[in-house]
Image (tube, grey):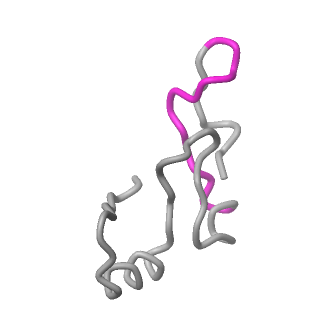
Amino acid sequence: MLDPDQTVYAAGGRVIVKPVISPRLAARHRVFRLPKDVTRLIVADDVRQAVLAANCAGVNFETVP
């Protein structure tokens, strides 16, 4: 999902300093995560709305710029 031309990596290219999501790649998915990020998911708004409607506990949503 990362835009390879815009994402910034630390020296060596293994650590992501600033991830930039590609709208073109992300548009095909409703749920995904960034590489090596095991605790956060990026979800489409309809998925977020369904989770909120189900009153799931322990979930926090933040806007992705």
For the point 60% across and 24% down, the residue is 15
Q: Residue 19: image x %, image y %?
A: 54, 39
Looking at the image, the residue that sits furthest to the top is 11
Left or right of 39? Residue 63 is: left
User: Where 10 sits versus 22, above or below?
Assistant: above
Left or right of 53? Residue 10 is: right
Count of numbered circles on the image: 0
Q: Quadrant of residue 58?
A: bottom left
Q: Nearer the viewer, residue 63 or 38?
A: 38
For the point 29% across and 82% down, the residue is 55
Q: Nearer the viewer, residue 14 or 39?
A: 39
Q: Nearer the viewer, residue 1 or 47?
A: 47
Left or right of 35? Residue 43 is: left
Q: Which residues are magenta?
A: 11-24
Q: Quadrant of residue 64?
A: bottom left
For the point 64% across and 42% down, the residue is 35
For the point 61% across and 37% down, the residue is 6
User: Where 19 sits versus 29, above or below?
Assistant: above
Magenta stretch: helix, strand or loop mostly = loop
Looking at the image, the residue that sits furthest to the front is 57
Q: Residue 34: image x %, image y %?
A: 59, 47
Q: Residue 1: image x %, image y %?
A: 66, 53
Question: Residue 49 magenta-drawn?
Answer: no
Question: Residue 16 magenta-drawn?
Answer: yes
User: Where 55 sits versus 25, above or below?
Assistant: below
